[in-house]
Amino acid sequence: MGHRIRVSVIIATYNQADLLAETLRHLARQTLPTDEFEVIVGDDGSSDHTTEVVRSFADTLQVKYVFQEDRGFRAAAARNAAARLAAGALLVTLDTGSMVGPDFLTAHLAAHAGGDGRRAVMGLSYGYTPDEPKQEVQELLAQMLPETAVERFRDMPDFQDVRQSYFADCELDLSRRRVAWQAFWTLNSSVRTDDFRRVGGFEEKFQGWGGEDMELALRLLRAGLTLHVAPEAWVVVAPHDRDPEANLEALFANMRMFLAKFPEPVVELGLGVMLDKGDFWGWERTYAELLDWQQRVRDLSVRDEIAKALVDVPADESVAVIGCGADVPTTMAGAVLVDFDEELLARAVRSGDHSGYHAVGLHTLLADDSVDTVVITSRMTGLWATWSAEILAEADRIGRRTVSYAAPATS
């Protein structure tokens, strides 16, 4: 009956057989006929009775199962393995423990049916807290169906999706968000299967918890898709044990990989707000501040500053300039140039034998002690109140000596 399948639901799982059974049980209650969707479980190496759970649903769901060896947290690879088996035109991703109502799949289909162009859709996830589970949600799910819980408690702050204010502040119009991909999470999302495959699916180098879904969303956006919120395509996330410390460590490692793949200011700021500030939702604000400052200093030349900073620097020493602008001294050869304005940076690099990095200077891809002198220009002044400690720490990491015009000079 493969030709009749409209939706493929992929679920990554690991040693959560009983929770998986509950997720599958709710998928079996869909108003969408069961011959129009399939469920594909991507097992990341479980050693419990996950296989038996999947087999137990063979008579109620069109279910497929793919197993990969347990070599650590590889949810991205497990999802890709499941997606390779997908026969549906629409791919819906769920986490184990995402409990759905009867209209869940029809809501995802409807979200892709309206409007022009291709889109990636995220549904609401009630009761989800990345740090620690809420026991109250577990109690609700034990007493009532997910749709009853949502009907009664959807406006209760502790039950709402943690992205609720992020969505509400833009009135669900993510085109008004500059960093909308930060809200795209695979515990409840959907995209056309051909679009997913066209961008290469999940990046399997991401291991451990977090980041791989945001990185996929960025690639989908740059492939021409738009991001949308579908409030009616909701799930209720059943609480389960997590290791917040290990998850945070993995997220930071994955965000560094994200930056290595997309070495540009918007991703660098994402790493900065998470790692340095512990402020995930500050990503949008800090990027807006950067874009505003970029326009304000568009015509600011720091050529004289750079020349002054290098007066006492021997000609054979290596130099990096953070906030170089377009105009650098012609006597300076082979410098490492860093700037948040990509167009100005390109002009500066072309003016001499320089290497260039499109970056703010918080977390560059430069090696430790790779230059002798780091010059921080006054083009960084507008970012100094927020990022001075990080920029100075990065300058200290990559260079032996720092000269700054964005703050009192250091040496």
Image (cartoon, rainbow, N blue to C red):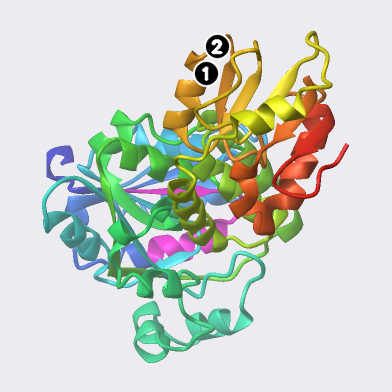
Q: Which residue is mark 1?
A: 349
Q: CB atoms at circles 2 and 1 under 8 Å apart?
A: yes
- In this orientation, does residue 91 appear? no
State the SS at label 1. Answer: helix
The image quadrant that residue 250 belongs to is top right
Q: Nearer the viewer, residue 52 or 346?
A: 346
Q: Is residue 236 magenta?
A: no
Q: Which residues are magenta?
A: 8-25
Q: Nearer the viewer, residue 160 or 263?
A: 263
Q: Please state, as top left, top right, bottom left or bottom right, where the C terminus lies in the image.
A: top right
Left or right, residue 52 beside residue 257: left
Classify 10 Å Cα crowding around label 2: few (below 14), some (14-19), many (20 and above): some
**Residue closest to the far bottom:** 152
Residue at 67%, 46% in the rendered image: 252
State the SS at label 2. Answer: loop
Residue at 20%, 60% in the rendered image: 111
Q: Please state, as top left, top right, bottom left or bottom right, where the N terminus lies in the image.
A: top left
Q: Give the x, y percent position of residue 121.
A: 30, 55
Q: Give the x, y percent position of residue 315.
A: 78, 10
Left or right, residue 253 beside residue 222: right
Q: Nearer the viewer, residue 403 or 273?
A: 403
Q: Nearer the viewer, residue 270 or 115?
A: 270
Q: Amino acid at mark 2?
A: Gly
Classify 10 Å Cα crowding around label 1: few (below 14), some (14-19), many (20 and above): many
Q: Give the x, y percent position of residue 70.
A: 64, 35
Q: Amino acid at mark 1?
A: Val
Q: Give the x, y percent position of residue 387.
A: 68, 52
Q: Which residue is mark 2?
A: 352
Residue at 59%, 53% in the rendered image: 382
Q: Is residue 3 above or below residue 6?
A: above
**How many dots with numbers?**
2
